[in-house]
Amino acid sequence: MTYSLQRTFQLLPLRAKKFVSHLLLALFFVASLSSLGAAQDVPDRILVGYWHNWGFSPNNLTLAQVPVEYDVINVSFAVPSTPLGSTIVFSPDPQLYPNPANFITDIQALQAQGKKVLISIGGANGPIHLNNATEISNFVSSMLTIIVTYGFDGLDIDLEGSSLLLAAGDTDFTNPTTPRVVNFISAINQVLSFLPPSFLLTAAPETATMQGGAAAYAGVWGSYLPVIHALRSSLDWVQVQHYNTGSMFGRDGNLYNPATADFHVAMADMLISGFNVPSAGTSFPPLNPNQVVIGLPASTSAAGSGYTAPGIVHTALDHLYLGLSGASSYQLGNVNGYEKFRGVMTWSINWDVNASNSFSQSHRAYLDTINLAADTSSVTYSSGAVVNFGLRAGVGHANRLYYLVPTISGTAPGTWLPGGRIFPINLDFTSNWPFQPLTAPFFAGFLGILDFQGNATATLNVPATAGQPPFTAHYAYILSYPWEFYSPAVQIDFVP
């Protein structure tokens, strides 16, 4: 049996009723201040992909053909002009762009869609050696030339091989002595000093060079730690490659096998919770959850090992985002999960397209609906319909009051909330329909209490209506004070 929202409201205790009344009054009051807010430049939850600047392996793909699901495109790669050099060069592959101007046009088109296009340096075949001040200068000037020439939004560090190999006697990642490491940190800081604060900086270490520091700190093992530690205040996110790797020790001292949910959770949690680096005699301090992305192969052909089926990945992400461990035995540093966890990266966009976009479509759908899902994107209202909503806020929000808010006025600029947050709903007369006597019966579960896992369901019962023109509505939910949690909005199109 389902109750209308009006009936639910009547059954709530006095304290809950006061919350709802205060919530509605406050939301409508601050709606007038919504113009003070601004949308975030980069989405909270991102899908990142590497794009091949070469043809025929496995396909010819221009930037204009990148699937719409990607938020960030890493152009691969800018490399040294000579092997192990310091002067970095890049030009669009003539097989893909006979006219280089078209490459810039495609970048600008992606940027106009709200995408970010980064230049990635190094790769498996492009080690970079910065051994002295002259080579630092070569790196800085050449990178700035590339960035300005093509208008890149950011720089991705994908150094492999001998680029950051730790020298003998270098035992403290907080105070590195290996010249190539020290010089590379200096070079990146110099590049950033010439660029605006909005310029993005990301990195894609291998597991050995990052989490491998928990087992040893020498040579390749842990060699990224001094770089990530020194640049942590400038880094937007770190996307460790969870592929082409062997088993790795987690923060708990247990060994985890690749391509499993626990492996992905353990490797991510190490960065967010911090981990001991015994050989260095100290611990790697935690990164913020929104600085951590997991890197995955787009298909079984994209990497030698590590491909993980979407269902297993989503189990891992449920654990990271929502604290839902399921069958997992791994214990997060924060049992409630990390709702600000950043997202997923793949090698590569080309391999994804080669596999019929199966990677981007499955993970985009997950990222977009993790907190709020609706079972339809289009409703034919002339014959009536039912729309079911699934709300998931995570175990850290269990037993909290929620309100699922409708609007037909869109999501931008949204409603400003205390603390500078923006609720992605433009409040209008429909936002109060769940409490109006004539309309409340159609909004079941739009007000309620989340269960012990932070979940709830709601139902919109659409009556049969004739003569109504097409319209679009959006829905998002918000929790009780201090209003620090709200869902992204979902869109539903109503058609005759």
Image (cartoon, rainbow, N blue to C red):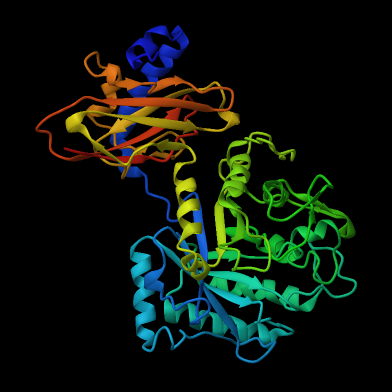
Q: Position of residue 433 (x, y in %)?
A: 26, 22
Indicate whether 264 appears above or below 371: below
Give the image quarter of residue 339: top right
Residue 29 visible to an observer of this rendering: no
What residue is drawn where x is 34% and y is 38%? 376
Q: In the image, is residue 218 above or below residue 295? A: below
Instruction: Identify the residue shown where x is 50% and y is 82%.
Output: 54
Residue 405 vertical placement versus 424 (above, below):
above
Residue 109: percent from left, percent from top: 33, 69
Q: Residue furthest bottom?
A: 82
Q: Nearer the viewer, residue 194 or 115?
A: 115
- Left or right: 386 as drawn, with respect to 196: left
Residue 263 percent across, percent down from the top left: 71, 51
For residue 229, side relative to residue 169 (left or right): left
Identity of the residue furthest to the left in this view: 467
Which residue is at the front of the view, 465 or 338?
Answer: 465
Where residue 490 sits in the image (x, y, percent)?
A: 36, 40
Q: Give the image quarter of residue 213.
A: bottom right
Where the N terminus falls, by quadrant? top left
